[in-house]
Image (cartoon, rainbow, N blue to C red):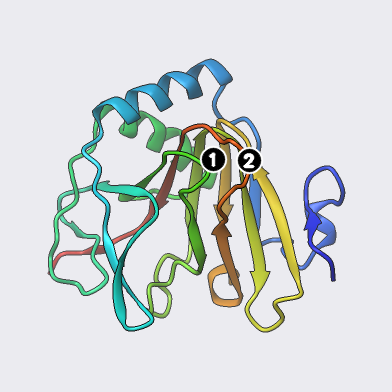
Amino acid sequence: MDQLKIFGEIDLEETPLKGLLDYRPALFSPSESDRLLTKLIAVTPRTQRSVLMYGREVLTPRLTAWFGDQDTDHSIQGDGSKPLPWTDDLMAIKEKVDEAAGISFNSVLLNYYRNGNDSVSWHDDMDGIPGRNRVVASISLGAVRVFDVRNKADHNLKFSIPLQNGSFLLMKGDFQLNWQHRIAKSNKPVGERVNLTFRISRLVT
């Protein structure tokens, strides 16, 4: 199957992704989205993490920061790493996201895409741990970037969603188990974007 646009060309309900994704293009108004984008870029203490890829450590092509409840561990290894405390703006966003998703999240990963060269490669959000991040809610602020989705068993089965400024995307059900997603690099000039992925992190024990 050729790559398809879910919105504008086909209906999400007519794809194998029915029941796995919930997309709302304007959970936040343009003015509120622009305000939040400017504020989060200005005040967030971001870092560029290194990850192990093909046997060597490489820097991720974007900047990140973790926030959340202080009794949670956001690390993959379960080493008790503490997230940054919630800010007033992030807590206000979380309240709206919780209501839209029908679930209470306890942490959020902020991804700052500086331009079209920043990206995230094909992945799922299970972090190698069965059942991890089964439900993830994503808020996009700023420049429109394309959210590509492909089936793990059949890479020819793939779809794309242009994520609008202020949009809400909920990944649920068996989405992480059977599908991968990415934000590819862009050859066209692209402005700044902040993506917030709300998750349920493990409790520190």
Disc 1, SS: helix
Whether 146 is drawn above or below 49: the answer is: above
Position of residue 119 in the picture relative to residue 156 (left or right): left
Front residue of 20/50: it is 50
In this view, the residue farthest toward the top is: 31
Three-letter code for the amino acid on which mark 1 is drawn: Ala
- Across and down, in percent, residue 74 comes to 25, 60
Query: Does residue 186 appear in the picture of this structure?
Result: yes
> Which quadrant is the C terminus positioned in?
bottom left
Cα distance in 3D space between marks 1 and 2: 32 Å
Position of residue 12 in the picture relative to residue 54 (left or right): right
| Disc marking residue 188 | 2
Q: Residue at x 41, y 80 (%)?
A: 130
Position of residue 54 in the picture relative to residue 50 (left or right): right
Mark in the foreground, 1 or 2: 2
Whether 59 is drawn above or below 84: the answer is: below
Front residue of 117/137: it is 117
**Quadrant hosting residue 154:** bottom right
Front residue of 153/16: it is 153
Q: Residue at x 38, y 22 (%)?
A: 38
Q: Of label 1 and label 2, which has the lower sequence position?
A: 1
Three-letter code for the amino acid on which mark 2 is drawn: Lys
Q: Residue at x 42, y 65 (%)?
A: 133
Position of residue 1 in the picture relative to residue 77 (left or right): right
- Across and down, in percent, residue 88 comes to 27, 27
Q: How many marks?
A: 2
Disc 2, SS: loop
Packing grade of label 2 (10 A; few <14, some 14-19, many >=20) is few
- Mark 1 — residue? 100
Query: Does residue 172 appear in the picture of this structure?
Result: no
